[in-house]
Amino acid sequence: MPCLNCNSKLLEMNKKINLPVCKVCGQIQAYRIYEVTDTSMVTSRTNDEFELKMLLSEFGLQTFQTEIMKNYNACNSHLLFKKIDLATRNVAITTYTLRQLKQKNYPLEYCKFAGTTWKKVARLLKRIDKHFGTSGILTSDDLECFYEEITEVEKENLIPIIKEWEEKETLTRGLLSALFYDNTVMTRDEARKLFGVSLPRLKRYLTKVRK
């Protein structure tokens, strides 16, 4: 959600007050304050959960909160988060869970909001994937929610192209971002954000698919 004061989307989490602050005008996004009715809930654990809930609320992901918290607690109990800062944990476990649920996710945007880097998140994601024995790889049958971002005509054109590529190699997010960009009216920024990849990675796969 944009800043209430100037409508900018450049928000970042201020860890001292546990609220997002606009990087353009400095406005504290006070409308995101949660009501706490039980003072006994104000603990270190609650504070950790609070920051995760802020992230989910910012991007409208409350529907997946139960599953995300379940994965968070599982990773925490197995010490996967040892020496990992809270912002990196939250972005990584949110991204991991959404990927396992075959949902759209925007980890680069989550990083900006939470105040961490994609490099740190990607490193933790590999650790989580290894622990759970998962890869986060998509198949052509997992793309329905991504097709919602393009027109029906573009979808009909793109499906056989993706299936053809799937027959010869794994559908990585980098490859999919390139295919979506090259066969729809999506901009490069829209395509890379849709699949959570960097611009250099998108460019590398564009070179590949255009050969």
Image: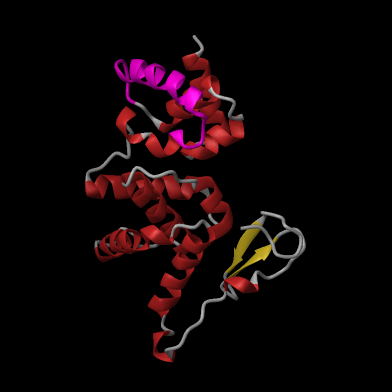
**Rendered position, 124 above or below 152:** below
Q: How is the image coloured?
A: secondary structure
Farthest-out residue, top = 211
- Magenta stretch containing residue 19, yes or no? no
Magenta residues, dominant SS class: helix
The magenta stretch spans which residues? 147-170
Q: Position of residue 135 (x, y in %)?
A: 29, 39
Q: Position of residue 106 (x, y in %)?
A: 50, 46
Residue at x 74% of width, y 66% of height: 26
Q: Position of residue 157 (x, y in %)?
A: 45, 18
Nearer to the camera, 10 or 204: 10
Residue at x 64% of width, y 74% of height: 30
Q: Position of residue 102 (x, y in %)?
A: 34, 42
**Rendered position, 131 above or below 210:** below
Farthest-out residue, left = 133
Any part of residue 169 in sight: yes
**Rendered position, 44 above or below 158:** below
Farthest-out residue, front = 152
Q: Is residue 20 left or right of residue 6?
A: left
Residue at x 67% of width, y 54% of height: 10
Any part of residue 198 in sight: no
